[in-house]
Amino acid sequence: MLEGKTVVLGVTGGIAAYKAADIASKLVQSGATVEVIMTESAQKFITPLTFRAITGRPAVTSMWEMTGEFSIEHISLAEAADIVLIAPATANTIARLACGLADDMLASTVLATRAPVIIAPAMNCNMYENTVTQENIQKLECRGFTFVGPETGRLACGTEGRGRLAATEAILSTVHMVLGRNGDLAGKTIVVTAGGTREPVDPVRYIGNRSSGKMGYALALAARDRGATVKLISTIDLPDTTGMDVFRVGTAGEMLTVVKEAVKGADALIMAAAVADFRPSQVAADKIKKDSISPYLKLEPTADILSEIQGDFIRVGFAAESRDLIENAKKKLAAKNLDLIVANDVTATGSGFGADTNKVTLLFKDGRIEDLPLMSKREVGEAIIDWMANGIE
């Protein structure tokens, strides 16, 4: 997903520097070319050899040592960068960048680059909360720098507070988001639903399904990474929602209410959520005891969100079936007047609830049918967003 991108990873001198090795590894796994710049202090915590082994490229450790292709002219590294990521960033580094210093390779590169810069702070909580540090962060944010973290938790010094380096997943998610800001969906708003609704029987039990929400999240991330403003309406609490508005709901009724508001001014609605078809007609105020449970539970239909939500925007639905896949999907496509329906057989290997892969068939309003091979849910999401990007004016 980062193929063809050059990420300049700045590593500064904090105890969290060891986590930068994992960040570098994940960036490489995503297809990026990673150029590491280490400050002198960073080398006290982790060696340049570590990063060379991970990235296959020598880490730049000085403005004066000609150890890599960018050593002679520090400006060339700044020009090669598609994005600069500093993780971890100490209070000292943030202060130097805020002052516009260029006294080492990292600071010089940041000052010279036109690429976006992401900063992931990591430091003692008192240092982070200090007025000076906060003012420096505000200065950099005003200049267009993006900050991710820090998180709250136990710090290396043994105290509890805000100062821990953001999780690798959050940092990588921010990289994808920032790189995608000017994508082909920039300026567009996409509403995505995810997860299975839960219709309560009593305060303990509910009627639901086994939807993991992974497909909806994959779609939301794919749209975000193409520059879209994403509104994710979810019944599941999954990580990796940096850079989007997330709305938590439980029941079909709650989802309908939130979707109605979210689609105002939207360019597309993707209903990836598995909405329960029925709910108990009455919800018990207290937990129903086993010896008092009736063998019969009276049900009533839930809201049909796709049928109720109409508007001048692209509408995409999903059909999770266990038999007669295409026939049932065609009926749903017509009945709900959709632009696209994504059909999948939940009994097929690698295509059921909770799997990281999916095997789907795309049925379009114009009658076209496209059968996709088994692929990751993120790849399925990309395929759907590819089609959507071409259809949004």
Image (cartoon, rainbow, N blue to C red):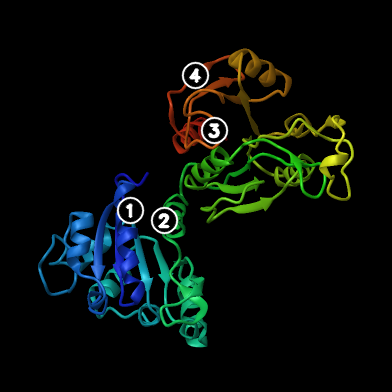
**Residue identified by numbered label 3:** 388
- Nearer to me, 245 or 229: 245
Query: How far, Cα to Cα, is label 1 from label 2?
Result: 7 Å
**Is residue 322 toward the left or the right of residue 101 in the image?**
right
Q: Are the two marked residues, 2 and 4, in contact with CB atoms closer than 8 angstroms?
A: no
Query: How far, Cα to Cα, is label 3 from label 1?
Result: 27 Å
Type of residue at label 2?
Answer: Leu
**Is residue 329 toward the left or the right of residue 26 in the image?**
right
Q: Are the two marked residues, 3 and 1, in contact with CB atoms closer than 8 angstroms?
A: no
* Mark 2 neighbour class, 10 Å CA radius: few under 14, some 14 to 19, many 20 or more: many
**Residue identified by numbered label 2:** 172
- Nearer to me, 95 or 349: 349
Query: How far, Cα to Cα, is label 2 from label 3?
Result: 25 Å
Type of residue at label 3?
Answer: Met
Label 3: which secondary element: helix
Type of residue at label 4?
Answer: Glu
Residue 50 position in % (x across, y down): 21, 63
For image coordinates 19% across by 67% down, the residue present is 48
N-terminal of the pair, mark 3 or mark 4, is 4
**Residue identified by numbered label 1:** 27
Asked if 295 appears above or below 75 in the picture, the reply is above
For image coordinates 11% across by 65% down, the residue present is 67
Residue 221 visible? The answer is yes
Residue 76 visible? The answer is no
Residue 370 is marked as: 4
Type of residue at label 1?
Answer: Leu
Query: How far, Cα to Cα, is label 2 from label 4?
Result: 32 Å
* Mark 1 neighbour class, 10 Å CA radius: few under 14, some 14 to 19, many 20 or more: many
